[in-house]
Image (spheres, rainbow, N blue to C red):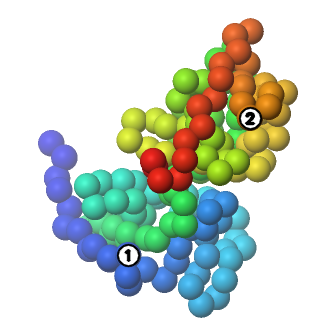
Amino acid sequence: MKKNLPEIVIPKEAAVFYLDRHGRWHHKEQGKFEHRKIIQYFHSCIRRDENGYHLRQRIGDRVEKVYFHYEDTALFVFDVIKGDDPLLLLNTGKKIKLRPRKLFVNDDELYVTSGEHRIKFTDNSLVRLWDLLGYEGEDYFITVKGKRYKIRQVKKETL
């Protein structure tokens, strides 16, 4: 049986770091994070509960949860693994299937939904998708397994 460890909870207002709209971590006073292993560790610790996104880590016999500010979303597609069923590699390290009907465009940015999560594509991940994407007039499309899907567009107020 799993034992519930005591939690240390740090509210958003007390967090000294945040995630920008491009998926980059920043310290409020010292600027953008530079150390790759620290950046990867922060991304891998992202979780969500009823109070929002936070970093969760075990410290000794306790769990620390630090809720943090983010400018757009806390989840990002960092890479695309192509194949018969393309996979999206998230900033957390998790892989999810590319589901064309879950894609949407908002303010010229591409997103995908997975459950209750809104996940934004980074510029690098868009480059990996480039040969699957198309644009005609005002409409965006993606072609997966030879089938062309129209990508829905939403206005900011509907998010």
Going by the numbered disc 1, the residue's amino acid type is Lys
Query: Which residue shows up at 56% across the image and 85% down it?
Result: 28
- Residue sitting farthest toward the top: 146
Name the residue carrying label 1: 12
Query: Which residue shows up at 76% across the image and 41% down it?
Result: 126
Q: Residue 14 appears at what percent x and percent y?
A: 38, 84
Does the residue at mark 1 contact the one at mark 2 (Cβ under 8 Å)? no
Front in this rendered view, residue 21 or 40: 21
**Does 85 sit left or right of 123 as displayed?**
left
Quarter assignment of residue 77: top right
**Does 122 sit left or right of 9 as displayed?**
right
Please tell me which of labels 1 and 2 falls first in the chain.
1
**Does 69 sit left or right of 40 as displayed?**
left
Q: Residue 18 appears at what percent x and percent y?
A: 53, 73
Going by the numbered disc 2, the residue's amino acid type is Glu
Front in this rendered view, residue 137 or 17: 137
Front in this rendered view, residue 64 or 102: 102
Q: Residue 29 appears at what percent x and percent y?
A: 59, 90
Answer few, some or many: residues within 10 Å of disc 2's Cα (few below 14, many 20 plus, some between 14 and 19): few
Residue at disc 2, secondary structure: loop
One can see residue 77 in this view: no
Name the residue carrying label 2: 138
Residue at disc 1, secondary structure: helix
- Measured in 3D between alpha carbons, the distance from the residue under mark 1 to the one under mark 2, in whole angstroms, is 38 Å
- Residue sitting farthest toward the front: 137
Viewer-nearest of discs 1 and 2: 2
Q: Could you tell me how many numbered marks the image carries?
A: 2
Q: Is residue 90 above or below residue 101?
A: below
